[in-house]
Amino acid sequence: MKYVKPGMTISEIKSSLVGYSFDKDFLSNYGIDSELEGTLIKHQHDNLLFVWTKYNSGKVFEVIVLNPKVYVDGNIRVGSTLNDFTSKYSDYRMELDAVNESTEYAYSKKCFYVIEFISNNTPVSEYNADFSLNKVVNSHAIIDRIRITMANKN
């Protein structure tokens, strides 16, 4: 699969991914508080990526990796564990989504993406009342999505 990255246009993505299909889907299905739609990129029957633009710019603001077939950083992919990520980035930080407390994020200033855990009833970490990290309780948690955003560029 060729690279898809923030800053590309949907037309550029479609022309570079010949043989892939493109469907519309709501941003809210990917944890984004919006009623707008983005583009779901599929290959055969596999959902691979979801991309969306911001402020009618025509340029992709965020790429969300949905499938374990897509690697973003050597061995990091959906299906990798928090341990896989932290062994690569020991300076990582964890955050709890203040709106949707079943979603947790890990990131490092040294990498270009954010990993996302949708924990439902099995949290990755415990947090203080101010949402700051208290401690990690499940370092074997599986990465559910990976977000590559224009804002993540170092």
Image: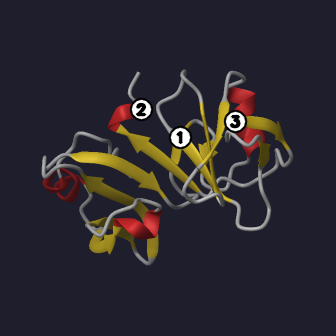
Q: Residues within 10 Å of mark 1 (few under 14, many from 20)?
A: some
Q: Amino acid at mark 1?
A: Val
User: Is residue 103 depicted above or below 6 in this figure?
Assistant: below
The reply to whether discs 1 and 2 touch (Cβ–Cβ < 8 Å) is yes
The type of residue carrying mark 2 is Asn
Q: Distance of mark 3 from mark 2, alpha carbons?
A: 20 Å
Which residue is identified by label 2? 152
Kindly identify the residue that appears in the image at 36 percent across and 33 percent down: 151
Q: Are marks 1 and 3 in contact (CB under 8 Å)?
A: no
Residue 134 point in image, percent of width and height: 81, 36
Q: CA distance from mark 1 to mark 3?
A: 17 Å
Q: Give the numbered dot on residue 114.
A: 1
Which residue is found at the position 65% from the left and 53% from the top? 143
Q: Mark 3: which amino acid?
A: Ser
Quadrant in the rendering for residue 108: top right
User: Dot 2: within a 10 Å radius of its alpha carbon, few (fewer than 14), some, or many (20 or more) residues?
Assistant: some
Residue that appears at 53% across and 61% down: 67
The residue that label 3 is drawn on is 132
Q: Position of residue 124 (x, y in %)?
A: 77, 50
Q: CA distance from mark 1 to mark 2?
A: 8 Å
Mark found first going from the N terminus, 3 or 2: 3
Query: In screen coordinates, is 99 left or right of 57?
Result: right
Mark before the other along the chain sequence, 1 or 2: 1
Element at label 1: strand
Q: Quadrant of residue 19?
A: bottom left
In contact (CB < 8 Å): disc 3 and disc 2: no
Q: Secondary structure at mark 2?
A: helix
Counting from the top left corner in percent of width and height, residue 154 is at: 41, 21
